[in-house]
Image: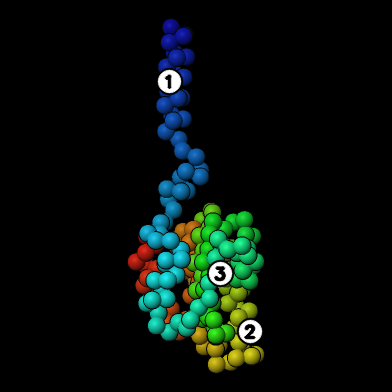
Amino acid sequence: MRTQAVLLLLIFLICLLSGCKSKESREKEAQVSCSISLTELADKIKEKDATLPEMTRAESGMEQGKDYFAYLSSLDYSKIEEYCFDYAANGTAEELAVILLKDKGDSEACKSSLEEHVHSRKTMYDAYKPEQSATVDKAEIIVKDAYVILLISKDTQAGEKVIEEYIK
C-alpha cells in the first residue's frame, strides 16, 4: 500500500513538473512578435515617411555594431538581441532605431537610455543647428514588449503606423 502511494505521488509530481515551463520559455511565448526582420521594418518605415532624407545604416551584424550602438544608447550591449539604426546621411536630425532586447524586462532601461540620447541630440542641435531642433522635439520612443523603437522625424506618425502593422 505504501509503495503504491509513493508511486502515485511520483507519477503526480512527474506530470506536474512536465507541465511547468521555464521562465525563459514563458517569456518567449509572451513576447510580441515582429512579422518581418528589424532591417525590413526600418525600410518599411522609411518608405512610408516621405520626410526622411537619405539614411546611413548601422546594425548589430556589423563588425563595429557594438560601437555604433554605444553612440545611440548607454544600455549594456549584452542585453541586445539585435538592432538596426539609421541616421541622416546629410547631418540633419532624423534617426530611426529598432532594438530587440534579449529580455523585455530591460525595455524601460532601454527607453530611458534613448531618452538621454534624444536629450543630447536636442542640446547639440539647439547650439549648432537650431533649425533641426523642431525635428528632435517630435521624437517618439515606442516600447512593445522586447522591442524599443526610436523615431526622430518630421512625421513620426507614419512610422508609428508601420510599427502597429508589423509588430503584434
Q: Tell me the crowding category of disc 1: few under 14, some 14 to 19, or many 20 or more residues within 10 angstroms, Cα based.
A: few
Residue type at the position of mark 1 = Ile
Looking at the image, can residue 74 be seen? Answer: no
State the SS at label 1: helix
Mark 2 = which residue?
Answer: 123
Q: Residue at x 46, y 66 (%)?
A: 39
Vertical placement of 66 versus 20: above or below?
below
Q: Residue at x 48, y 61 (%)?
A: 147
Residue 149 picture location, percent across and down:
49, 68
- Which residue is more in the foreground, 149 or 19? 149
Residue depth check, mark 1 versus mark 2: number of the one nearer the observer: 2
Residue 123 picture location, percent across and down:
63, 84
Q: Distance between the residues labelled 1 and 3?
A: 53 Å
Residue type at the position of mark 2 = Thr
State the SS at label 3: strand
The picture quadrant where one finds residue 34 is bottom left
Residue depth check, mark 2 versus mark 3: number of the one nearer the observer: 3
Q: Residue at x 62, y 59 (%)?
A: 77
Mark 3 = which residue?
Answer: 58
User: From the viewer's perspective, is 34 left or right of 78?
Assistant: left
State the SS at label 2: helix
Q: Residue 73 carries which label?
A: none
- The quarter in which the C terminus is drawn is bottom left
- Which residue is more in the foreground, 28 or 94? 94
Residue 32 picture location, percent across and down:
41, 56
Residue type at the position of mark 3 = Ala
Looking at the image, can residue 117 be seen? Answer: yes
Q: Earlier in the sequence, mark 2 or mark 3?
A: 3
Q: Distance between the residues labelled 2 and 3?
A: 23 Å
Mark 1 = which residue?
Answer: 11
Q: Earlier in the sequence, mark 1 or mark 2?
A: 1
Vertical placement of 129 versus 57: above or below?
below
